[in-house]
Image: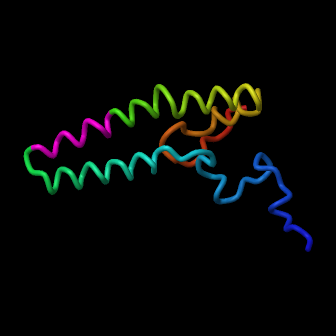
């Protein structure tokens, strides 16, 4: 069976709907799931529920500064070089926003 044209295109060549937003690990929505757990804690544990927010702040700090985005970006720069640097210039690092226009 012949693979479809979409499968044969490399991600850098395909700029359809799914490529409009950040198309690598989506840390934002992962973090949103954890915030949902914190909201549950706030709703059901009364005055002590605020402690659930501490964990979410630590997860966000970890994603933004330690294990998530910095490590992923560094690896991508090592392996993909200048092409990835151009990708970084047009794509949000954490929140899935539409791509910025190329300034080139």
> Which quarter of the image is occupied by the C terminus?
top right
> Which quarter of the image is occupied by the N terminus?
bottom right
User: From the viewer's perspective, is residue 90 above or below residue 41?
Assistant: above
Which residue shows up at 64% across the image and 41% down it?
A: 101
Farthest residue, direction right: 2
| Front residue (pair 12, 50) | 50
Left/right placement of residue 36 relative to residue 10 reads left
Percent across and percent down for residue 43 are 16, 56
Farthest residue, direction left: 47
User: From the viewer's perspective, is residue 96 above or below residue 85?
Assistant: below
Left/right placement of residue 76 relative to residue 1 reads left
| Front residue (pair 19, 38) | 38
Percent across and percent down for residue 47 are 7, 45
Percent across and percent down for residue 18 are 64, 57
- Please say whether residue 61 is one of the residues in the magenta stretch: no
Which residue shows up at 51% across the image and 30% down it?
A: 67
- Please say whether residue 50 is one of the residues in the magenta stretch: yes
- Magenta residues span 48-57
Which residue shows up at 45% across the image and 51% down it?
A: 29
Left/right placement of residue 66 relative to residue 72 reads left
Q: How is the image coloured?
A: rainbow
Percent across and percent down for residue 103 are 67, 33
Q: Quadrant of residue 5?
A: bottom right
Q: Main secondary structure of the magenta part?
A: helix
User: From the viewer's perspective, is residue 64 above or below residue 98?
Assistant: above
Farthest residue, direction bottom: 1
Report the label total.
Answer: 0
User: From the viewer's perspective, is residue 1 above or below residue 61?
Assistant: below
């Amino acid at each position: 069976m012949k693979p479809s044209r979409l499968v044969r295109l490399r991600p850098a060549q395909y700029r359809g709907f799914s490529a409009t937003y950040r198309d690598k690990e989506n840390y934002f929505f992962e973090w949103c799931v954890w915030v949902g757990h914190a909201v549950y804690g706030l709703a059901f544990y009364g005055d002590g529920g605020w402690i659930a927010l501490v964990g979410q702040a630590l997860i966000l700090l970890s994603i933004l500064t330690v294990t998530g985005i910095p490590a992923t970006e560094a690896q991508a720069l090592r392996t993909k070089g200048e092409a990835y640097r151009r990708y970084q210039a047009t794509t949000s690092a954490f929140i899935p926003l539409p791509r910025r226009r190329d300034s080139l």
